[in-house]
Amino acid sequence: MMIKTALALGGNLGDVVAAFKTAVQKLEAAGMININISSFCRTTPVGCASGTPDFMNAALTGNWPGSAEELFAVCQEIERESGRAAVHGINTPRTLDIDIILFGDRIIRSDTLQIPHPRAAQRLFVIAPLAEIAPDMIFPDTGKNVSDILKSL
């Protein structure tokens, strides 16, 4: 069974555009199909230390054949392969960050995974790119679609 999934991509170290393109290839190789990626946008860091370089952000949607936990593991591996340390601080510079924003209509709250992503609906750098490619996707915890969330930001 394929699950429509939304991911957020971000990075601010190295060749971020190349890291995004490689991430898409690796997601496809891991089984994701029908991938649609937003345009890339440069954003000012939010909640980061002074002097942190600007981020490049994008969103993608695709259909995933496995569990959310399996997708999470694939995303973490792709991050590590891009040069991101397995153990890292919050809001620190990174080569690549991949967050699962939505996983179908599922709400998952575990020690390792929070879906929908708990801060996604408050982050313009997540919602604006996602609205470009999936304005009608619903956040199951609020019942609001991406387009309505963007209007509220």
Image: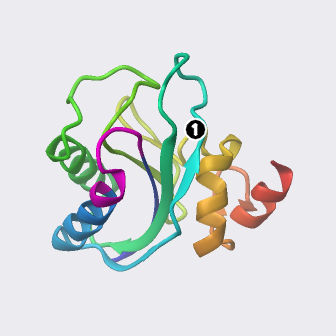
- Could you tell me residue 44's position as x and y percent? 60, 37
Toward which corner of the image does residue 27 lie, by quadrant? bottom left
Q: Is residue 69 above or below residue 112?
A: below
Q: Amino acid at mark 1?
A: Pro
Residue in view at x 48 percent, y 25 percent: 52
Q: Is 129 a magenta residue?
A: no
**Label 1 crowd bin: few (<14), some (14–19), many (20+), radius 10 Å:** few
Q: Residue furthest bottom?
A: 34
Circle 1 — which element?
Answer: loop
Q: Is residue 149 above or below residue 53?
A: below
Q: Is 18 a magenta residue?
A: yes
- Color encoding of the figure: rainbow
How many marks on residues? 1
Residue in view at x 39 percent, y 29 percent: 93
Q: Which residues are magenta?
A: 11-19
Instruction: Tell me if I can see residue 51 in this picture.
Output: yes
Q: Is residue 69 above or below residue 1?
A: above
Q: Which residue is mark 1?
A: 118
